[in-house]
Amino acid sequence: MIDTNLAVLLAERGLSISDLSSAIGVSRQTLTTFTDDTAGGIRFDTVNKICHYLKITPAELFNYLPYDYSFNSGEYYNAFDPESRLGSNRPDGYSTYEDEYFEEYFDEDYTKVVVSTNIRIESALTHAEHNLIASANILIEDFHPTTRMSGEIVLGELPDIDWEKPLDDQERAEQKAAMKLFREMYDAFSVRQKTYFMKKLSRCLCEIIAQHHSEVEGSDITARTFKSDFIIKNL
């Protein structure tokens, strides 16, 4: 995994993206992809201009960690509607849960959902690859573009739903190994990298919710319109 220190380097010098863009003749949009680590490809002449202007070396501009991660597949469940599950058929014995509690304490504007995704983790040190389950229980009030999504993310466990088939011993062993590798990667992250990881994971969960409302309810809301505030419970 390679990312950049550009945001930190600019902050240390009291410079903005616009200042750097004007000084070196590189578009603000291109430089923004450097600061948020979304650049798919980097031109050597752009790196050269940045290094010359900031008086740094490429080694000071870039960070390398021997880990990679990505998010793949996602599941959405509405606690009040077992038919809402996406991605697979509803398992036998699946039922809603906590219905009476939510009906008693919350009005119909609230929706209790469970969202889960897989985090694919790879290590260049050991060549290990694992898929780690990440799930979150979310209570949504008054669904609209400015809705704030918040909740606790749990790693390595299935969502708290009435499952017909829980994790078997082999799957639990896989999640234990995946969690061990995740901790190694996360401990190696800088504070900024941890923040960026949480931002990407939160966006992934919000995209699953937006996809559901787009496909099932005809909503044109996208994940980028949500405000999100998630924490990982079992780190």
Image (cartoon, rainbow, N blue to C red):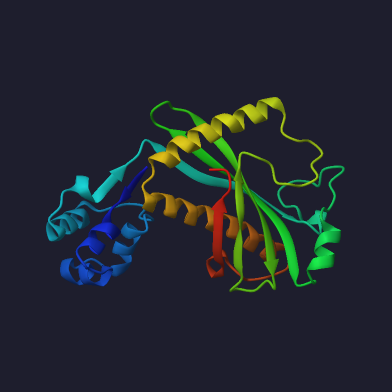
> Which residue is more in the foreground, 209 or 189?
189
Q: Residue at x 73, y 46 (%)?
A: 160
Provide residue 75's location: percent of width, then percent of height. 68, 50
Q: Residue at x 33, y 67 (%)?
A: 29
Please give left or right for residue 220 compared with residue 102 in the image.
left
Please give left or right for residue 147 compared with residue 79 in the image.
left
> Which residue is more in the foreground, 174 or 27?
174
Q: Residue at x 87, y 43 (%)?
A: 93
**As displayed, is residue 166 above or below residue 3?**
above
**As displayed, is residue 101 above or below residue 163?**
below
Rendered image quadrant of residue 81? bottom right
Rendered image quadrant of residue 214? bottom right
**As displayed, is residue 212 above or below residue 191?**
below
Provide residue 30's location: percent of width, then percent of height. 30, 63
Provide residue 103's location: percent of width, then percent of height. 84, 65
Please give left or right for residue 129 compared with residue 94 in the image.
left
